[in-house]
Image (cartoon, rainbow, N blue to C red):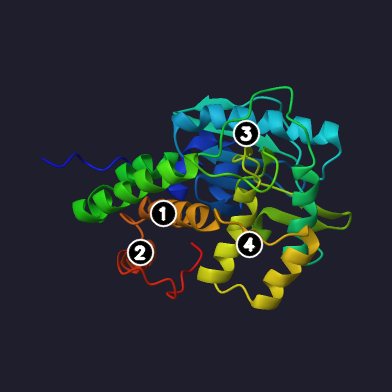
Amino acid sequence: MTEPSPAAFTEARARDVLAAAGHPDAAADAPLLSLGENAVFALGERGPVVRVGRSAELLERAERELRVARWLADEGVPAVRAAEPVATLVEGHPVTYWQRLPEAVRPAGPDDLAALLRLVHALPEPPFALPRRELLDGVERWLRLAGDAVSASDAEYLRGRRDAFAAAASALEPHLPRGPIHGDALPRNVHVGPDGPVLVDLETFSSDLREHDLVVMALSRDRYGLGADAYGAFVSAYGWDVRDWAGCAVLRGSRETASCAWVSQHAAGNPAALKEFRRRIASLREQDATVRWYPF
């Protein structure tokens, strides 16, 4: 018998948690800034931003993200700053508070991201432990959340890819020195305010191959429609093209696998997510690297 799918993490559920966290008035009308692993709300016109995590198992990651923010502030790296020093667990969901960023003056570009990555990649290890960037660790949880929206065959296929790429990644020889990385290095995780670009979404900070941060943009060029000129600007600003590294295909395949599985967790209650999951899984099964994927 198939187990029932876990309760979906929806905007309505996140607003219930927001109310339980002591913001009953804001819960009804606080603007939702994003909904993914976290639901992110703006509290008032000048208040902080609050993030409600998808599940209790993300509490440790939320606590580490707060430590990362303090460390980056000490190191002088432009990044989002915490508004409260601790994470709390509210009705099974981690809740954290962050300083509101000023309005963006322009969209972030690949060169903005590259400049910030150069700063991060020059950092020594922090005074606390950072995990490895285990891209594939979430696959099982995402498939579990997907429930019956993902066929048993597709789930087993993704598990097989996960295991194969995890084994291959463990044997890679890096070109760059290992150390702190952002872990989800995309322009959408850069905010350009009046004082310049800052890093946001610090939850995937890790200590691992620096190439992880660079493969993200290479995959954006291959799968998500990033233009050659934009990718060239990224490479020029960073100073090296990860596609020249022999291990690039392994990290690229790992990230494709994780990205496909990540979408699956939304598929049960969102037809657009189900459509995108089916697009991605078909292209992987058919080994068609030319199929365009769409951000979700």
Q: Quadrant of residue 233?
A: bottom right
Q: Quadrant of residue 139?
A: top left
Residue type beneath disc 1: Thr
Give the answer, above or below, for where 162 lies relative to 63. below
Q: Where does the N terminus fall, quadrant-wise?
A: top left
Does the residue at mark 1 contact the one at mark 2 (Cβ under 8 Å)? yes
Residue visible at 89% across and 54% down in the picture: 195
Give the camera-side residue of 76 and 48. Answer: 76
**Visible residue check, residue 257:** yes
Which residue has dot 1 on it? Answer: 257
Residue visible at 54% across and 53% down in the picture: 247
Q: Which mark is residue 284?
A: 2
Does the residue at mark 1 contact the one at mark 3 (Cβ under 8 Å)? no
Q: Nearer the viewer, mark 1 or mark 3?
A: 1
Callout 1: helix, strand or loop? Answer: helix
Q: Nearer the viewer, mark 2 or mark 4?
A: 4
Give the answer, above or below, for where 65 lies relative to 153. above
Mark 1 or mark 4: name the one nearer the start of the chain: 4
Which residue has dot 3 on it? Answer: 96
